[in-house]
Image (cartoon, helix red, strand yellow):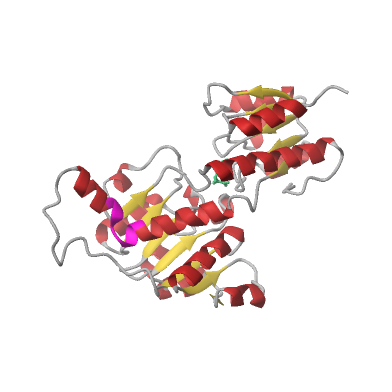
Amino acid sequence: MAKPRVLVTRAWPKAVEAKMAEAFELTLNRDDRPLGLADLRAALANYDAVLPTVTDKLPAQVFDLPEARTKILANYGVGFAHIDTAAAKSRGIAVTNTPDVLSECTADIAMTLMLMAARRAGEGERELREGRWTGWRPTHLIGSKVSGATLGIIGFGRIGQAMAQRAHHGFGMKILVQNRSAVASEILARYDAEQVPTVEDLLPRCDFVSLHCPGGSANRHLIDARRLDLMKPSAFLINTARGEVVDEYALAQALWFGTIGGAGLDVFEREPAIPPELLGADNLVMLPHLGSATRETREAMGFRVFENLQDFFAGRDPRDKVA
Ligand code: 8YV
């Protein structure tokens, strides 16, 4: 039997590409540039499997083609809001993702942002590099204490829980949780966490708020001007989820006017574009979508995609089927 034709849309860790090449007829995107809508539509016509990343936007119009050869979109990443899963399903195309393997590294980056923003690490580093440091003084770059503070977690799935683990057990933080469904009491008990019914209940009580919910239209601008106003003026917002969850212009205003104390962002609404209003805000730490960017995790994500493909082409249900 001929090997399935598989398209990897970006450059992946070499070890994963090598393993994939043994099992499949593999096409690699050597340019490592995001594919456009027309390229993706052509990919659906010509490959048995397409392995997109967050930079491959697959709205309904991409699926509008006379005949799709693709039977599975095996996404390289846990978030899949860039894929219109309903449109995929209507064309008989399965969708999988890569949960679990990136939870720890993404929570590590959320902790990094929280610590950097609260302790003004970005400002301090800029000062040093630009030769502006005049020496130690008691009132220099005074930040906010993280240990023992209250952290609100919006979205209490695998990554939200990994964040709670670090914050509660490592930093003695009090954990408040807001989640669309009820979280089992034994899970909350692991972090001595309290679930609150709404985002409005959570925001005014927190020193830090970290977002771990999915992106997509359901959560678009979940954090808007009205909700930023509910936060303490000393509180920090951390986003490692998806850019669209936060209204970036409202956030820029809140940072400039001191409605909140600061923020840390790893994701943006129109990546790689960053609104100039954010670029100028000193009380903001920004990273270029590094959540899962470790050697170990990027390889594990690739092998998880491989596992999903193997199952699929062997006629089994892939473990990470999301549509
Ligand atoms: C990935 C992510 O690097 O998995 C996700 O949802 O946000 C990142 O960690 C990216 O999505 C790759 O497609």
Q: Please tell me which residue is depicted at 76% across the width and 37% down the height of the picture.
A: 309
Q: Please tell me which residue is depicted at 67% across the width and 74% down the height of the picture.
A: 184
Principal secondary structure, stretch drawn in magenta: helix
Q: Please tell me which residue is depicted at 46% across the width and 47% down the height of the picture.
A: 267
Closer-to-camera residue (160/179): 160
Q: Is residue 24 in view?
A: no
The image quadrant where one finds ligand 1 is top right
- Which region is colored magenta? 116-122
Would residue 269 be counted in the magenta stretch?
no
Q: Is residue 26 in view?
A: yes
Of the 4 image quadrants, the one containing the N terminus is top right
Q: Please tell me which residue is depicted at 77% across the width and 29% down the height of the picture.
A: 23
Closer-to-camera residue (51/38): 51
> Compared to 156, does 265 lie above or below?
above
Residue 102 appears left or right of 254: right
Q: Residue furthest left?
A: 134
Quarter holding residue 87: top right
> Compared to 175, does 211 lie above or below?
above
Residue 168 appears left or right of 276: right
Quarter holding residue 130: top left
Residue 245 appears left or right of 117: right
